[in-house]
Amino acid sequence: MDDTVILQLSQIHKSFGDVKVLDGIDLSVRKGEFITLLGPSGCGKTTTLRIIAGLERPDSGRVFIAGKDVTNEEPNRRNVNTVFQNYALFPHMTVEANIGYSLRLKRVDKETIKKTVSQALELVQLSGYEKRMPDELSGGQKQRVAIARAIVNQPAVLLLDEPLGALDLQLRRQMQVELKRLRARLGVTFVYITHDQEEALNMSDRIAVMRNGKFEQIGTPSDVYDRPKTSYVARFVGSANIVEGTVLESDGQRIAFRSQGAVCLVAARGARLSPGEAVRVAVRSEMVDLTPYASPELPYSGLDAAGGNPGDSQVGLQAVVKEKNFAGGVLQITVSLADGSELVASRHGIDSPLVPGDKVRVTWQPERAVLVDLEETP
Amino acid sequence: MKPEALAKTGEPRPGEPTSREEGARKPTKRRDAMVLSVLPLYVFTFLFVIGPLVYMLVLSFLRRAEVWGVTLEFTFENYANILKPVYLKTFLESLKLACLTTLLVALFGYPFGYFMARQNAAWKRRIMVLLMIPFWTSSLVRLYGWIIIFRANGVLDGLLMALNITNAPLKVLYTYAAVVVGMVYALVPFMIFAVYSSAEKLDWQLVEAARDLGATPFQAFWTVSFKLTLPGLLSGIVLTFIPSMGLFFIADILGGNKVVLVGNLIQEQLMKARNWPFAAALSVVLLTLTSIMIALYRKISGVKDLEGLV
Ligand SMILES: Nc1ncnc2c1ncn2[C@@H]1O[C@H](COP(=O)(O)OP(=O)(O)OP(=O)(O)O)[C@@H](O)[C@H]1O
Ligand SMILES: [Mg+2]
């Protein structure tokens, strides 16, 4: 991978009327990188992409493509191409004419166009579909044509707006694999939009998690999944539980904090917190351990006294099993905590001996929990 | 409805749960019901469309009676008459005016309809109302309005002279120009509606896709928007061209006796000269010409319905 920056956004602001849609977007994408904008509906993903494509003008901020300031360039003068969310194939043109459209505008000779188009069709596995009209194609085929049309021009950056959003799950998985292969073959830079976190984790080099027109965290899939910076990212990417509390003490490695009358532990990872400070901790459901809770709470005796394995010590939140759900190959056990809030633990397998109404103790390995919202919490 | 369409609807649709015997009985029953329900349509069509057409066609091959009506005598005389230079000239004149009118209507109506479709819903509604208001008044009344504007020392002359653009009345009334303006005015709404209904359906994202792929605004318009609104433009052309061949009263009122069109000729032959067979022959030729137009339109656009025919 080349380390040169091919696309850069700096301090992009955009409002539609009174609605502030983008609020200071900064992004820099390396050549050949696959970057995904991930976020819930309405957070401004499409708007960001349209600003890169030139279909929308930012109120302020700059867009650089290959080092050149293109903020005020028309879309046709930018070396980027878009795969639109609903394909946007020209209905009055054949597949061949659709794919060759940009080449015809450049007045490339007919022979070359024909050759390039058939290569592109081969690349998206649609050879022989040259003469079809768009309305004679299935959704997946339309999507392939849209991709072929966008790559035939060899853009510096390929922009894809939820390209798989309209496809069913199976086709979507298949297209994910194909897109990855395609990208490996072409080496084109991808800016990809999705609101499916699994898709983002599967395909990207980096993920930019978006919230209300801002990037909440930009990092590798494992950064955002294993080390979320904020509770929002932890919830959105890993469907994590968030536990709040106040710091009791820290030994540099771990931090002990009090939450709902119990004591919990979390790996410090360099965070320096003093007793009394408020903390928020993210724990993904598969990291949550539930143990039957027979005896009353044991007194917490400090980090040192807890011995070699604090996870085994008598700390942990008291909870009552509320319900069990089997979905997507895992069993989800919802428990309610002392303050009435809920927490989810997941297990492989179809059932567990726990039944609703059981009293349990909620614990986790401290290194599996992550401190979040550090700069936010007072 | 066409007979083959009728037969098609009578058949059981695939996937319909019919037991075997039911399936055998039901279609015929349904077909009977269908025939009954469309029968009035056929009767109506026969009485008011086919009947008059046949009557006109027959009439056009008969000889004119000395004083009143026709004699039952077969002749090609009426058609031969049309080929006389004076009448042929009228046809050419009509064609010329129709072409000019249609061209102007397209030049004005296409952009209007196109940009109207690009407005937001509130503005679309407002523009639509403004376009509809004239239809609530008689077209004759509106034509007299033009007379007031066009006549010597009328509104137009007054305005032009007040602005020092001209210093003598132009006397536009009873000129070819007045007729053209009147025709364009009367027919432009149809073009606007036809283009609008077509442009309304245009997915703007396609234009953005074109721009994204390297098209300038004009290239995007030409290769995408124009191509996709062409059916609207074509039906607009048909909707303007055909009436403009026959709109005799505009030529009458705004052109005085100077502009004689096929429509005027037919009216004159029918009402004044009382030569019904000749009027019928003229009508048959006019009808043939316009039918050719529609056939051509269908061939070009590949559609069977006139889009925007509101
Ligand atoms: N042309 C526009 N005029 C007014 N508001 C707009 C316009 N385009 C987008 N918005 C608003 O901007 C916000 C962000 O829109 P955007 O399309 O970028 O969201 P998104 O993240 O792509 O969402 P989704 O996942 O639903 O596609 C939304 O609240 C939307 O209503
Ligand atoms: Mg979107």
Image (tube, coloured by chain):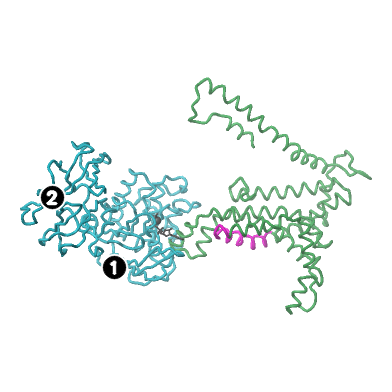
Chain colours: A cyan, B green
Q: Mark 2: which secondary structure?
A: loop
Query: Tag 1: residue type?
Result: Val
Magenta span contains residue A2: no
Quadrant for the C terminus of chain A, please. Answer: bottom left
Q: Is residue A107 above or below residue A123?
A: below
Tell me the magenta residue range: B102-122
Pick the residue in front: A140 or A287.
A287
Number of numbered discs on residues: 2
Residue B80 placed where, x, y %?
82, 49
Main SS category, magenta section: helix
Kindly give the residue lying farthest to the right in the view shown.
B67
Q: Amino acid at mark 2?
A: Val
Asked which secondary structure carries label 1, the reply is strand
Left/right placement of residue B200 relative to residue B272 reads left
Where does the N terminus of chain A fall, quadrant-wise?
Answer: bottom left
Which corner quadrant of the image does residue A292 belong to? top left
Is the CB of mark 2 within 8 Å of ligand 1? no
Residue B85 position in % (x across, y down): 82, 57
Instruction: Please tell me in which quadrant of the rendered image residue B37 appears.
Output: top right
Task: Please state if A363 lies on the left or on the right of B25 as rendered.
Answer: left
Where residue A338 appears, as percent x and y from the top left, is 22, 48
Report crowding for label 1: few under 14, some 14 to 19, many 20 or more residues within 10 A (C-alpha).
Answer: some
**Residue hosting label 2:** A315
Numbered mark located on residue A326 in the image: none
Mark 2 vs mark 1, CA separation in Å: 48 Å
Residue at mark 1:
A5
Give the letter of the chain under mark 1: A
**Does A269 sit left or right of B157 as displayed?**
left
Residue B121 visible in the shown view: yes
